[in-house]
Image (cartoon, rainbow, N blue to C red):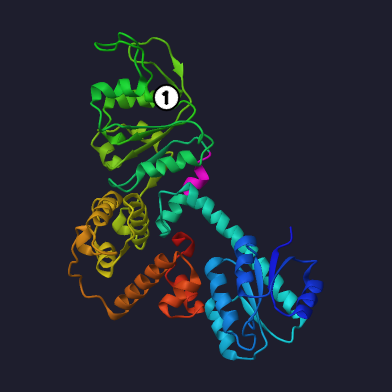
Amino acid sequence: MKPKLLIVEDEEPIRTQLTSALRDDFTLFFAEDRAEALSAVACERPAVVSLDLGLPPHPESSECGLEALDQIMRTAPATKVVVLTGNGGRESVIRSVQLGAFDYHQKPIQLPDLKVMLQRAANLQTLEAEAEKRGNETLIRFADMLGHTPGMREIFAVVSRIARSDVTVLIQGESGTGKELLARAVHANSARSTRPFVAINCGAIPDTLLESELFGHERGAYTGAYTQRKGKLELADGGTLFLDEIGEMSPPLQVKLLRFLQERELERVGGRGVLRVDARVVAATNKDLKAELQARRFREDLYYRLSVVNLTLPPLRERGEDVMLIANALLQRTCKAHRRKLRFGSSALEAIAHHPWPGNVRELENAVERAVLMAHGKLVEARDLGIELKERPTASLREARDRAERGALVEALVKTRGNITQASRLLAVSRPTLHGLITRYEVSTRDFK
């Protein structure tokens, strides 16, 4: 399928010339002024636009063309725009590049050169669209888990590799780091994604009832067992069972769980029949299971059965700029729920960046929800979050500069949702300079979209 090319040109001879030269390589659309161009961009979403800067009603200047370019880039920032200028003004060319033009071509038109330029723009737009599609697929799979620090990227990569297998997974990490979300990501990326995801918190149920909850019971198995009841393992047949706080499970139940993992068979409490169940097990704990092994509170053979793949979620205080990404995502979600339009003020941004977050993402979520309810005006400040700015140790000049530079970069990308042109304009730097900062600080613009 040929890429779409919109030609914005008010002179009929030039339109005819371009049509003859480009119709074999592009699906062509035409517009003669700014209004027609914006309408065509909105309706057709062309991959490339060839834009004459000398548009009516003032074809002698570049002003109408530059206004059209600015509006096109706001409407369709992924579109590649090649500007054609006959006015010879270097300022117009520079302004075009600042507004986001892909390239420029000086009139009179040299068709071979222009054709190569347009084809290159179309190829780049196709590659970027494919990359964004793949990025969005990753984002969908980990929709509730934002993160682009090296540690989180490695976790996402491991999940993508092992999800379609049936290996047992053990997730470790402090409370509030998102262990259940990661377990759901394992399930969502697996061949079992259309089957049940069943979760049970082993620390929230008394030990006397946990066995029945896991394995089910027959009628009359104990006082109050008036009917037969399936356990969580049976309910997860064909799907995934998530055992949260597995470190709280008693030794007798650990033995029964180990037998299930070895044989994939179980007996209901009070039952005599053996049932085969095909359930993948993902377990999680905030305890140090190796310490539990040494204290003989957790079985070594069960530990190695559970930790075929072992994932450790880092605490929020060790996740760098992810804190700001997560905070902004939570703010957007909470504002939508409470029908408010807010953004973080400078004191809130600084407080979020330097608070230790002992409760991790759960604490951050609570703080943001509180702030949305407490904030006056359009800005969330530190006092609305319920956290205070604290004195920090004096850093070296280089450290302070790097921290400030990285913070400004992340804040600009958050505000513009990863749009390079808008972020460079916000920071008052050129696009190449912004790309250099992104590379230097290992920031991915895709994660801000």
- As for residue 245 lying within the magenta part, the answer is no
Q: In the picture, which quadrant includes the N terminus?
A: bottom right
Q: Is residue 112 visible?
A: no
In the image, residue 317 sits, relative to residue 72, either above or below, namely above
Q: Secondary structure at mark 1?
A: helix
In the image, residue 424 sits, relative to residue 210, either above or below, namely below
Q: Is residue 273 visible?
A: yes
Which corner quadrant of the image does residue 324 belong to?
bottom left
In the image, residue 311 sits, relative to residue 434, either above or below, namely above
* Left or right placement of residue 107 versus residue 265 in this view: right
Would you say the magenta stretch is mainly helix, strand or loop? helix
- Mark 1 sits on what residue? 235
Which corner quadrant of the image does residue 201 belong to?
top left
Which kind of residue does numbered mark 1 sit on? Leu
Residue located at (67% from left, 66% from top)? 123
- As for residue 162 lying within the magenta part, the answer is yes
Which corner quadrant of the image does residue 391 belong to?
bottom left
Q: Position of residue 448 (x, y in %)?
A: 44, 61
In the image, residue 367 sits, relative to residue 237, either above or below, namely below
* Left or right placement of residue 365 versus residue 43 in this view: left
Residue located at (26% from left, 38% from top)? 292
* Left or right placement of residue 143 versus residue 56 in this view: left
Q: Position of residue 299 (x, y in %)?
A: 31, 31
Q: Position of residue 95 (x, y in %)?
A: 54, 83
Q: Position of residue 336 (x, y in %)?
A: 36, 52
Q: Nearer the viewer, residue 200 or 417?
A: 417
| Mark 1 crowd level (few <14, some 14–19, many ≥20, 10 Å Cα) | many
Q: Nearer the viewer, residue 124 or 94?
A: 94
Residue located at (58% from left, 59% from top)? 131
Q: Which residues are magenta?
A: 158-164
